[in-house]
Image (spheres, rainbow, N blue to C red):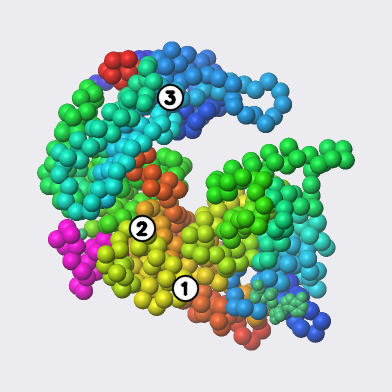
Amino acid sequence: MKAGPSQEEIRRHNLGTLLRHVHLGGSTSRAVLADRMGLNRSTILGLVSELSSAGLIREELPQDTGRAGRPSLVVRPESDRVYVLAFDVGVDRLAAARIGLGGVFLGRRETPWPRGGFDSGEVADVLAGFARQLMDTARDGTLCVGLGAAVRGLVRRSDGVVRSAAHIGWKEEEFGEDLTRRLGLGLPVSVENEANLGAVAEHLRGAGTGCQDLLYLHGDIGIGGGIIAGGQLLGGDGGYGGEIGHMVVNPRGGRPCGCGARGCLESEAGERALLQAARRDPSATGRDAVRAVVEAADRGDISARAALHDVGDWLGIAVGGLVNILNPRTVIFGGTLREVFLGSAAQIRSRINSHALGAAREHLRLRVGELGDDAVLVGAAELAFSEILVGPLETLARTGA
Amino acid sequence: MTATPILRLRGIEKSFGPVQVLHDVAFDVHPGEVTALVGDNGAGKSTLVKCIGGIHPFDGGEYWFEGERVQVHSPRDAAAMGVEIVYQDLALCDNLDIVQNMFLGREKRRGLVLDDATMEEMAARTLEGLSVRTVKSIRQQVSSLSGGQRQTVAIAKAVLWNSKVVVLDEPTAALGVAQTAQVLELVRRLADNGLAVVLISHNMNDVFAVSDRIAALYLGRMAAQVKASDVTHSQIVELITSGRSGDLGLVHTNGATP
Ligand SMILES: Nc1ncnc2c1ncn2[C@@H]1O[C@H](COP(=O)(O)OP(=O)(O)O)[C@@H](O)[C@H]1O
Ligand SMILES: [Mg+2]
Ligand SMILES: [Zn+2]
């Protein structure tokens, strides 16, 4: 039988928790930290000095108090010194960012990439090149503590293998391992589904801050989904959970989906369905094309209005069903679904209200993403930070600081 | 969401000469929520809002604010309680800059001279607090702003005074899709920050995108006030066009809401 946690375990836990508070909440006074963590001030003082001598946080005068009197010191993350690299394999762009503790963007690189098939090795090469450029701009004495990558596909939790990513034509790609090797930083790259990371990002830093149960729907070429339940990302058995886009809403008359099924939310309400129903020029794709449909509907164009009406129906049906199962507090529409939501909210809300159980929907909030196109990179950075926020000193020791 | 309304109207009556415009109107507004006020053209939305803002006196009825019966005889009375209205015409001065507009008629002075530094700081802090990043400089003339930016400045002006209730009369009516989105996000943020917001709009997508409650006026009477999680688009359309939808709305015999 195991006894309670040791002093050492408690200390480690408290160090991680304090660092997480400062990482997510920004500059915070010791008094507030003591209050939030339910610890006494001398314990907080000890934790703060340990983390500051490790170079993870710093105490300083607040920048602008706007109030008279002697301001008290605040604890802030060493954003310039401690950072992670975040990677995003999009459907039509590759992006990388250097993001400091506290969530500060310190630099980014991005390149458009033609839609369609990508070679995984080529992608890893480009991203590794970005990483080197980003690290070259970092001052001496700075420290990379984690690596995270987002992919639009199903990622096996145990080893980061991308099982399938239909929009970029990947199958069973050992992408994480490949990128880890090409980077050669002595740190593993954690790989995760892009909408799951968007969900994490909006949960920690965006429209879902403070909300423990949320659904995130991300529109780009397809519809990605991420679910936070009880404050945790819902991955399921193997890590493949949360694929809201492949929830079948229209099995009989529905359109074929890239996944092989028929009538998935993605095939009924995704970009292609919207653009087709609105009779748009098939060569125009992406956010501008989606926005043009919403604009045309606003001016009264009937096919655009009908298309948004249908898409809103399917979105409402899918979300209504999920509300019954998961009882989220917030549903967040990100990517191009932000525009779609604003153009069909009446339809979406009405469907939810007629399909979801009264008690399950009574406090439901519908929101658009607050992080915009950065959501995925922010989420990848949070993934990369997760280790140092659990065991700050151990992680530093491992990264050789 | 809270159960007690911050602003509560009961039995409101209003006529312009022989023309009756509002009859027995009840209206509740809650902190932390967006309450949409909808109704056909001429239903009396703007009139109701002008009464709330102290521009028009009520002919009868009760005005309650934070649990107390109040008398509101002027916009000054309304502002003193923390009620601010952004009217349809915005009433911004084109030839003045953003800061000057935000403080128009309520300038800060140090002795006899204007306290520009304080006003600038308050304006900047308000815009920042609303996460407004679309205006380049707060010393920019209002004439150089887009429709959405003007609306943003008008809203910022309304929240500058630690207001508790902000009423927006058709803020998105003249805007394109992208600017409407910005204004709606701002509206939502105000409520999420704890303000009570009233939004008048004809666009049902705008209404359903941001509101927590929907109040439908029909020919000067409040047909129903319902939670946005309890109604459908078609029910709201019915309330707007006929004052009734199923068990919701006006009972035609005596005009009382069930
Ligand atoms: N100052 C006024 N004098 C006379 N009639 C008015 C005045 N203001 C509004 N009305 C009338 O009151 C009715 C309601 O108008 P209004 O409140 O502007 O409606 P809404 O904003 O719902 O379109 C209309 O019939 C309008 O003509
Ligand atoms: Mg009006
Ligand atoms: Zn599918």
Tell whether B80 sits left or right of B233: right
Write the residue at 38% across / 73% down.
A304
Q: Are marks 1 and 3 in contact (CB under 8 Å)?
A: no
Give the amino acid type for the residue marked by disc 2 in the picture: Arg
- Residue B54 in percent (x, y) is at 78, 63
**What residue did someone put label 3 on?**
A80
Q: Which quadrant of the figure has residue B174?
A: bottom right
10 Å neighbourhood of mark 2: few (<14), some, or many (≥20)? some
Q: Quadrant of the N terminus of chain A?
A: top left
First along the sequence among labels 3 and 2? 3
Please determine whether, in this image, residue A326 is positioned above or below residue A81: below
Tell whether B226 sits left or right of B100: left
**What residue did someone put label 2 on?**
A287
Bounds of the magenta segment: A250-272
**What residue did someone put label 1 on?**
A299
Write the residue at 33% across / 25% down.
A136
Helix or strand or loop: what does disc 2 sit on? helix
